[in-house]
Image (spheres, grey):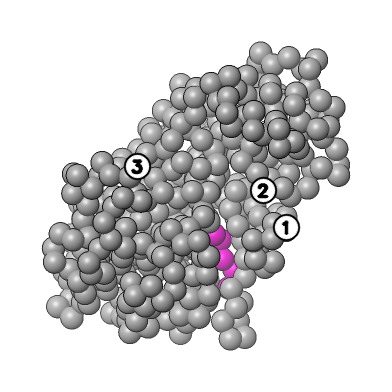
Amino acid sequence: MIFNTLFKSMFAVTLLMNINAVAIGDDGQAHEATAADAKVPFWELPLLDKAFINSAPNDRKDGLLVGELGVDGGNKDMIVKLAQEMADNKHGDYDSLLIAYKGKFLFESYYKRGRINLPHFLASGTKGNTALVVGRAIELGYLTLDDLHKPLVSFFKGLDATKFVKGVEKITLHQAMTMRSGLRFTDEVMEKFRTNSDQYKGLAQLQAFFELSAPVTSETQVYNYRGYDPIMVMHVLNAVVPGSAEDFIKTEFFGKLGISNYSWRTDAAGQPLGETGLNIMSRDLLKLGALVMNEGRLNGEQFLPADYLAKATSAITRVTEDWQPKSFFYGYLWYQTNLIVGDKSYDAKVSWGGGGNRIITIAALDLVVVITGHDMKDTIMTQVSNTILPAFIR
C-alpha cells in the first residue's frame, strides 16, 4: 500500500482515541514548549523530567491522519520498550521518535530536549530538504530533468569565466547534488571563506569557488562530502525560481505542506544555506517522509516528480567518508541503504544529519520513521534494524 493517506482532508472526521493507548509521562504540558522555551537556544533547553510516549498520537489539526499502534499495525510492546530505553539514555542522546505506518501516524515520543511544538535542528539533514525543494522546482517547470546534466555555470549570469580554474565547465548540477563537483580547496582558502562571509556572498561566492579551487579533473570528480556542493545547488534554485529561494521554499514548498513553524538559516546574502541550518518540528518531518513514500504525491496530486524522486533517493554513488557506514550509498543529498532483518533485505531511503536526525522510509513496509537527537556517536540505526522494522514485519 502506497502512503496515500498520511495527509488528510481538513474536513476529515477526527479519529477517536482508544482508551488503552499508552501515554507515559504526559502531564498535559511538559512535552510542549512554552513561549519562553521558544526563545532559548537548543543547548539551553531544560531536559524533560519525564519522557512523553504516546502509542495513539493526538490529532493536532496539522494534516496528519492519526491512528493507534497495535490496533492499526505494529508491535506496541516492542516500540514502547525501545522508546523508554531511549528516554533512559540506553541508546544515546535522542530527542524524539515518531512512526507512521500504512498512512497513519501511530507513535509519538519525546525525551530530553525534544518538544512536540518546537522545531529541532537537522544539521546536515537540511541537505535532504534542499533536494526535495529542487524536485518542487522541477515539478513547477522552473527546472527540467535534463537541466540536472547541464553545466552548473550555465545557470548564472555575471560570472567572469576568464578567471575560472580549468575544468569548472565540467561540473553539472547532477554532480553537485551527488557530492562529486570536483572542487577542491586548501585549508587556507576554506578558512578565508569561513572568516569573510560578507565578502563571499551571492555571485561573489560562486566566483570564488570557481577561481580558488584546484583544477577540476576526472580524478577529483569523485564522492567528496563537503558543504560547498549543496551550497551551489541552492544558488541554482535561487537563480531559477521566481523571487528568491527563500520565498519559494516558504510559499511553494513548506507552505503547500502546511508547514509554517520552521526556520532555515540564511547566508550573508539572505539565501538559505543548502547544507545545514534548517530547524523543523518532528511531526512535519513525517510529512516529508510521506512525500518520499508516496512517490511525490500530495493529496492525490503530483507535488514532486516521481522520476526525479526515485533518482534522488537511489544508490547513485558509494559513500567514502570514514564515518559513513560502508553499506550506505548517496543519491541527490539523500542516502540509500539496505536494512537486513533475518534473511530479508529492505530498501531504505534516508535523510541524515549529525546528532542522529533522520527521516527513514521503507516502501516495502509502508513505514516512515522520524528520529531527532543530539548524539555524538549516533548508533540508533542498529535499533531501527533490530527493533523498529521487526515490530512491523508480519
Q: Are marks 3 and 1 in contact (CB under 8 Å)?
A: no
Q: Nearer the viewer, mark 3 or mark 1?
A: 1
Q: Residue at x 46, y 21 (%)?
A: 243
State the separation of the CA atoms marked 1 and 2. Answer: 8 Å
Q: How many marks?
A: 3
Which amino acid does the dot numbered 2 rest on?
Tyr
Q: Quadrant of residue 78?
A: bottom left
Q: Are marks 3 and 2 in contact (CB under 8 Å)?
A: no
- Graded by Cα atoms within 10 Å as few (under 14), some (14 to 19) or many (20 or more), the crowding at tag 3 reads some
Say whether disc 1 or disc 2 marks the residue closer to the N-terminus. Answer: 2
On screen, residue 228 above or below 161: below
Magenta part, dominant SS: strand
Q: Residue 245: x and y, percent?
A: 48, 29
Element type where label 1 sits in the image: loop
Residue at image mark 1: 320
Task: Specify whether residue 349 is painted magenta.
Answer: yes
Q: Residue 267: x and y, percent?
A: 49, 29
Residue at image mark 2: 225
Q: Are marks 1 and 2 in contact (CB under 8 Å)?
A: yes
Which amino acid does the dot numbered 3 rest on?
Tyr
Assign the N terminus to one quadrant of the image. bottom left
Say whether disc 3 or disc 2 marks the residue closer to the N-terminus. Answer: 2
- Graded by Cα atoms within 10 Å as few (under 14), some (14 to 19) or many (20 or more), the crowding at tag 1 reads some
Q: Residue 269: x and y, percent?
A: 50, 22
Residue at image mark 3: 262
Q: Pick whichever, 382 or 171, lies toward us.
A: 382
Q: Which residues are magenta?
A: 346-350
Q: Residue 190: x and y, percent?
A: 66, 34
Q: Nearer the viewer, mark 3 or mark 2?
A: 2
Q: Pick whichever, 190 or 169, lies toward us.
A: 190
Q: Residue at x 69, y 57 (%)?
A: 321
On screen, residue 349 above or below 128: below
